[in-house]
Amino acid sequence: MLAGVPVDARRDPLAALAELPGVLPACLAAREEIDQMLWDRTVRANAADIATESRLQGARASAALEGAEVSLAAMRAGVAEEDSPVSRAVGAAIAVTAAIPRQVDTFGRAPLQVIAHLHVLATRGFAAEDERGRPRATDEVIDPLHIGSLPAVADISPRLDALAGVLTRATDAPAVLVAAIAHGEVLALRPFAWGSGLVARAMLRCVLAARGVDPDLLGCPELGLLAAGRTAYVKALRGYASGEPEGVADWIEFNARAIAVSNQTG
């Protein structure tokens, strides 16, 4: 069972969420912004460069949300190659974001495999070999966002399985909504001792690409999350984790707004 997914909507457990107040308009507005970006002639003519810039800025924003904030100039200068906690966190964010294009096809049929693979990349130098890509076995996590309310170890596998189930079945829910739920579930669950945030934010890109919304990964939803601020991010996530309809709706709208400004990669 996922947080906030209605029990009485088992045939299409995500579609009912689109009926929550404000959710569908927010998702449609985000989709319209992405479509406008993709139809822009300048964007199409420079797609490869924009995708590269999106990965760089997305990694920087995701690392910053983990508390490892560096400038774009430092990113371009190779800060990730230095030996410090911040540079290693930045390097982890770069590795995760860079790997997503090669994982999109697999994500559509085996999302948990991709989640594990991204965690392996994120934890190089951070975790023991037997912990990389595997759910945590204790209730001890590094929580840079100070989310609190950590789900029990016993809940991890059932909830990951439930997430895989909704990600691999047909749904009438907008892809933006699906991306928000995937992002929220991994972030709220924190299935890994370290790196869950990096993997959770990667879910936005994975879902939007796998479902054909942004197949070339030109957008940068992490920028929208960072622009909203860590305080607003955590507040929205806690609302999702509560399972209350209002909190879940607020989380989906929060993600939709972040995705809506994801074309600002220049």
Image (cartoon, rainbow, N blue to C red):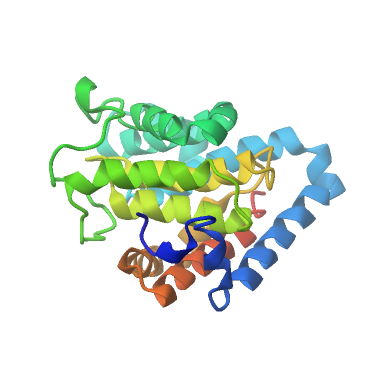
Measured from the top left, where is residue 62 in percent x and y? 43, 47
Measured from the top left, where is residue 42 in percent x and y? 83, 46
In the drawing, does residue 172 fall left or right of residue 88?
right
Residue placed furthest toward the top: 129
Number of on-image labels: 0
Measured from the top left, where is residue 125 in percent x and y? 26, 26
In the drawing, does residue 105 fall left or right of residue 1?
right
In the drawing, does residue 103 fall left or right of residue 143?
right
Which residue is rendered at x = 40% and y = 69% of the image? 232
Image quarter in which the N terminus is found: bottom left
Q: Does residue 130 appear in this view?
A: yes
- 259 relative to 22, above or below: above
Which residue is rendered at x = 33% and y = 63% of the image? 241
- 261 relative to 157, above or below: below
- 78 relative to 185, above or below: above
The image quadrant that residue 151 belongs to is bottom left
The image quadrant that residue 106 belongs to is top right
Measured from the top left, where is residue 180 in percent x and y? 50, 57
In the drawing, does residue 172 fall left or right of residue 165?
right
Q: Nearer the viewer, residue 24 or 256?
A: 24
Residue placed furthest toward the right: 41
Which residue is rendered at x = 54% and y = 39% of the image? 56
Which residue is rendered at x = 38% and y = 26% of the image? 81
The image quadrant that residue 191 belongs to is top left
Q: Does residue 72 appear in this view?
A: no
